[in-house]
């Protein structure tokens, strides 16, 4: 009888230990930028690692990570203190990883912005000129805290860290939040939709050099659609200190582009008689 009691007691201990063990975490490929966090025993890092891997998979996995160039077109809106400051503008955007971008504006595409590394130029009917230093600083700050930049450069860099920051309501949906820190003690918080696993928001802060107060920037993504195996947000909204500062809508290809407008002639009837 004693043997039976000891056996049952040992079985209860094993069952209890199994129940308290953390659920297995799906690891990412060894070549993904999150790989350096795979062996961490810290629960917060482990959870952040899982969320980031889920997000990369949802965006297209290797197809997303290996994008080197892209082209897009749509409409752009500017805002001042959260209110529209003018009409929408047609734009065409050409991007090459890591730091080249060309934006052509207006229907005539006669206003062009070029970004190459840390240099920025504007081309108009007047000619070519360097952009205003404050505008360049704002662009570089946004680029260096962008989702692509954080995933491709911050995560794999030595001295980086990731932490799970819990859940929050973002754009009326529950999202997991992961904070990524680099070796310079700069940080970006990525909000990942709990169901779709798409990133819905990237937020960051910086200290204003004049008033020494912290300012906040954010980018919100929505309306994802698959483009060549990569989930792409067709709506991107920019915020500064809680106010909307810009908005971009990508143009979807109309089905009529691939449909004829009716037959207008018969090529067989146009052939001269033999």
Image (spheres, rainbow, N blue to C red):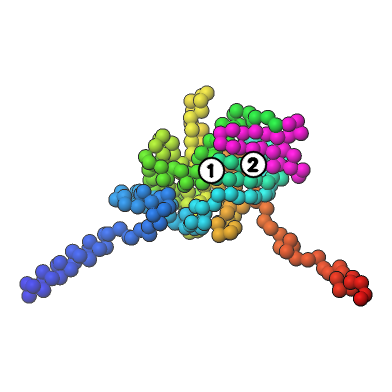
> Which residue, as the protein is rendered here, is positioned at the far right?
273
For the stretch drawn in magenta, the main secondary structure is strand
Q: Is mark 1 on a helix, strand or loop?
A: loop
**Residue 82 can be seen in this image:** no
What residue would you read off at disc 1? Answer: 98
Q: Give the range drawn in magenta.
A: 102-127
Task: Name which quarter of the figure residue 82 lies in.
Answer: top right
Name the residue rendered at 32%, 60% in the picture.
Answer: 23
Q: Was residue 216 drawn as part of the magenta stretch in this picture? A: no
Name the residue rendered at 48%, 36% in the picture.
Answer: 205
Name the residue rendered at 50%, 43% in the picture.
Answer: 149
Q: Depth check: 63 or 234 in front?
A: 63
Q: Position of residue 135 (x, y in %)?
A: 61, 32
Quick check: 53 left or right of 105? left
What residue would you read off at disc 2? Answer: 102
Q: Position of residue 165 (x, y in %)?
A: 40, 46
Quick check: 4 left or right of 157? left
Q: Position of residue 164 (x, y in %)?
A: 39, 48
Q: Was residue 105 drawn as part of the magenta stretch in this picture? A: yes
Q: Where is residue 9 in the image (x, y as percent from the top left)?
A: 14, 67
Q: Depth check: 124 or 231 in front?
A: 124
Q: Depth check: 118 or 203 in front?
A: 118
Q: In this view, does 69 lie above or below 216?
A: below
């Amino acid at each position: 009888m004693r043997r039976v009691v000891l056996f049952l007691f040992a079985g209860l201990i094993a069952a209890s230990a199994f129940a308290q063990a953390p659920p297995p975490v799906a690891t990412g490929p060894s070549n993904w930028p999150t790989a350096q966090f795979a062996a961490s025993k810290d629960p917060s890092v482990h959870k952040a690692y899982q969320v980031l891997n889920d997000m990369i998979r949802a965006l297209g996995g290797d197809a997303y990570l290996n994008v080197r160039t892209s082209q897009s077109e749509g409409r752009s809106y500017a805002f001042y203190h959260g209110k529209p400051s003018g009409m929408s503008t047609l734009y065409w955007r050409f991007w090459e990883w890591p730091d080249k971008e060309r934006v052509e504006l207006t229907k005539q595409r006669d206003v062009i912005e070029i970004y190459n590394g840390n240099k920025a130029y504007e081309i108009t009917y007047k000619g070519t000129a360097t952009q205003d230093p404050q505008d360049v600083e704002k662009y570089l700050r946004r680029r260096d805290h962008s989702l692509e930049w954080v995933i491709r450069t911050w995560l794999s860099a030595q001295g980086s860290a990731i932490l799970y920051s819990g859940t929050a309501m973002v754009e009326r949906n529950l999202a997991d939040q992961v904070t990524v820190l680099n070796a310079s003690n700069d940080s970006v918080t990525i909000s990942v939709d709990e169901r779709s696993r798409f990133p819905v928001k990237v937020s960051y802060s910086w200290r204003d050099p004049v008033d020494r107060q912290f300012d906040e920037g954010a980018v919100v993504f929505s309306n994802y659609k698959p483009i060549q195996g990569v989930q792409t947000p067709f709506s991107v909204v920019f915020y500064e200190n809680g106010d909307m500062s810009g908005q971009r809508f990508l143009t979807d290809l109309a089905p009529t582009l691939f449909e004829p407008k009716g037959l207008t002639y018969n090529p067989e009837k146009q052939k001269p008689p033999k």
